[in-house]
Image (spheres, helix red, strand yellow):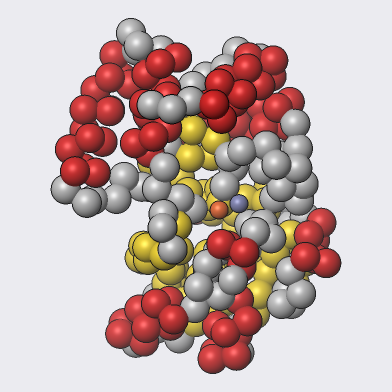
Amino acid sequence: MVEIVRIPALSDNYIWLVHEPGSGETLVIDPAVADPVLAEADARGWRITQVWNTHWHPDHTGGNGAIKAATSCRITGPAAEAERIPTLDRWVAEGDRVALGAIEAIVMETPAHTAGHISYHLPSEGLIFVGDTLFAMGCGRLFEGEADQMHANLQRFAALPPETFVYCAHEYTLANGRFALSVEPDNRALVERMEQVEVMRAAGEATLPTTIALERATNPFMRAPSAEELAERRRAKDAFRG
Ligand code: ZN
Ligand code: FE
């Protein structure tokens, strides 16, 4: 099993540091910045060997260059965004396999937040890194894609094993949950989840990772019955001031 450490960065990003003890490989998912990542790996005696990016936004790739300069790691990211991520060493697309030691990730193309956004599913570990596609009780903004693409992404995620852990790139849970309650005020699972989230955030605790089962029960975007409904909810969320 891999060991995963959460590194908070910028205002609400989470950078995930993933260590595979069998091979000694250490992976960084979406480094917004470099310094706290290098410090955390150093403190644990882990040597960073890889970076995997989900999309080109600077809060997901900003640390690429400095981490590569410090560690000579190999950087993997979406082929469709290669021109926007000049630090990439390897370009991947739907169905490609990426190895972390003996562990394999399968690349899923999950466009909509950006046109080339990808997610990394690690079936043997029961987890997925979704970048800015899926959040706890929310989904990414549709900057470079359409609601039908996001709907398709979320339905693919919903079909993963329910116990799958979902590692998102931002702590947006509280604001997302407040919007979710406006959509489904009578959803018991959602009401209970938000009671817990309020307590956790008041104590400064992280609410991630989430799980597919939890999102299926409480996420108004994953639960949207159609792309049209998802589009409607996304527009409402963009204007929502909870
Ligand atoms: Zn983004
Ligand atoms: Fe982001």
Numbered disc total: 0
Quadrant where the C terminus sits is: top left
- Comparing 198 with 78, the one in front is 198
- Comparing 72 with 34, the one in front is 34
Q: Residue furthest top?
A: 186
Q: Quadrant of residue 51?
A: bottom right
Q: Residue at x 60, y 90 (%)?
A: 69
Left or right position of 191 against 42: left
Location of residue 6 in the rendering, given as x and y in whole percent from the top left corner: 36, 62
Q: Residue at x 23, y 50 (%)?
A: 205
**116 relative to 220, above or below:** below
**193 relative to 143, above or below:** above
Q: Is residue 190 visible?
A: yes
Location of residue 196 in the rendering, given as x and y in whole percent from the top left corner: 21, 33
- Comparing 112 with 216, the one in front is 112
Q: Residue at x 45, y 50 (%)?
A: 170
